[in-house]
C-alpha cells in the first residue's frame, strides 16, 4: 500500500514472491510502478493497481503487507489491514513520524496486531507488527 516507484514490489518478486500487488492512490505512481516492473522483467508477478484500501476488495488475505502511508490513512485503514493479512503474517507500517508511533501502535493493537519492533531514522518510523496465528 502506497507503492511509490514499486521498488519494494519489484524486490519482492525478484526474491521469489509468487505474486505481488502494489497499490497507490496516485495515477502516475501506479503507472510508474508498472513501468518499473516491466523494466525489471517481473511484470508477470507484479500488478500495480490504482486505488486506496478499497482496491483490495475481493482479494484473499496476503502473506505480508507493507503500508508506507501517512498516519491518518494508516489509522483509518487499520481494521481493513487486519482483514487482509493472513494469521501469523507480518505487516510493516512506515511513512509516519516518530511522535505518531504511540497512536499507530494503539490502533494496531486494537485491531489485533502484536507489536514486534520499530526503527527510527530522521524522525521517520518503520514499525513491524504481526497478525496472531
Image (tube, rainbow, N blue to C red):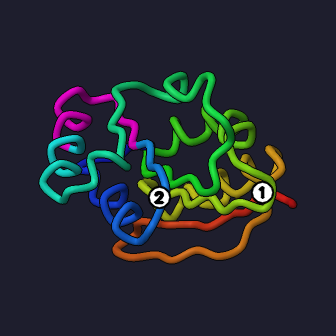
Quick check: is 64 in the magenta stretch? no
| Residue 64 x %, y % | 60, 57
Q: Residue at x 54, y 57 (%)?
A: 93
Q: Which of the image's four quarters has the C terminus?
A: bottom right
What mark, if any, has residue 108 been given in the picture? none
The magenta span reads 22-32
Going from the N terminus, do you reach mark 2 or mark 1 first?
A: 2
Identify the residue under disc 1.
131
At a point 17% along the width and 51% down the height, the residue shown is 36
**Was residue 27 drawn as part of the magenta stretch in this picture?**
yes
Looking at the image, residue 75 sits to the left or right of residue 109; the answer is left
Of badges 2 and 1, the one in the foreground is: 1
Which label number is shown at residue 94? 2
Lateral position of residue 9 relative to residue 94, left or right: left
What SS does tag 2 mark? strand
SS of the residue under disc 1: loop
The answer for how far apart the CA atoms under marks 2 and 1 are is: 17 Å
Amino acid at each position: 500500500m502506497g507503492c511509490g516507484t514499486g521498488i519494494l514490489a519489484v524486490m519482492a518478486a525478484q526474491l521469489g514472491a509468487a505474486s505481488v500487488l502494489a497499490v497507490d492512490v496516485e495515477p502516475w505512481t501506479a503507472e510508474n510502478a508498472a513501468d518499473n516492473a516491466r523494466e525489471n522483467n517481473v511484470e508477470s508477478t507484479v500488478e500495480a493497481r490504482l486505488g486506496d484500501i478499497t482496491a483490495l476488495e475481493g482479494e484473499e488475505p496476503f502473506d505480508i503487507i507493507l503500508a508506507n502511508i501517512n498516519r491518518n490513512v494508516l489509522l483509518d485503514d487499520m481494521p481493513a489491514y487486519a482483514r487482509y493479512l493472513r494469521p501469523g503474517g507480518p505487516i510493516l507500517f512506515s511513512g509516519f513520524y516518530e511522535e505518531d508511533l504511540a497512536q499507530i501502535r494503539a490502533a494496531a493493537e486494537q485491531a489485533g496486531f502484536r507489536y514486534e519492533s520499530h526503527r527510527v531514522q530522521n524522525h521517520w518510523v518503520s514499525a513491524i507488527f504481526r497478525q496472531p496465528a
